[in-house]
Image (cartoon, rainbow, N blue to C red):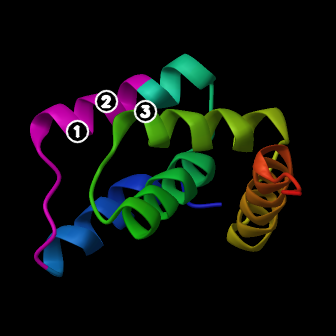
Amino acid sequence: MNENVLDDYIALLASKGFRLSEGDLHFVDFGKHYTDASEPQVKIALEVTLIKQRSFDGSYFIAILESLVNENITSKKKAYELLDQLQNNNERKHSYTVG
């Protein structure tokens, strides 16, 4: 797999007018090293963060990245399946019956 996946994705974002700040880019690099994630995992976590949060949210990014690494997920399809599963589990924890 292309080792510049993340750089290519950041360049694609910039070409479309979405630029991450230097601080955001440093945080993405920190997250990669903190979680020992692969380039594809970091790219997926960044993409999911930007789509779901509509901006860069460092804590959301790290949480997604940790989940991807823990589950050894390297594809977008599997990442979204995991997110759906986590969301469903979270909704079940917070649901209750009134009456």
* Image quarter of the N terminus: bottom right
Q: Which residues are magenta?
A: 17-30
Using the image as rendered, state which of residue 64 and residue 21 is in the foreground: 64
Q: Amino acid at mark 1?
A: Asp
Magenta-drawn stretch contains 82 = no
Q: Amino acid at mark 2?
A: Phe
Residue 24: numbered disc: 1
The quadrant holding residue 83 is: bottom right
Left or right, 99 with respect to 18, comes to right
Name the residue at 46% across, 65% down: 52
As measured in the structure, the alpha-carbon distance from the residue carrying label 1 to the one carrying label 3 is 11 Å
As measured in the structure, the alpha-carbon distance from the residue carrying label 1 to the one carrying label 2 is 5 Å
> Which class describes the residues within 10 Å of circle 2: few (<14), some (14-19), or many (20+)?
some
Left or right, 4 with respect to 70, comes to left
Query: Residue 92's spot in the image, x, y percent?
Result: 86, 53
Judging by the rendered image, the residue that carries numbered circle 3 is: 59
* Image quarter of the C terminus: bottom right
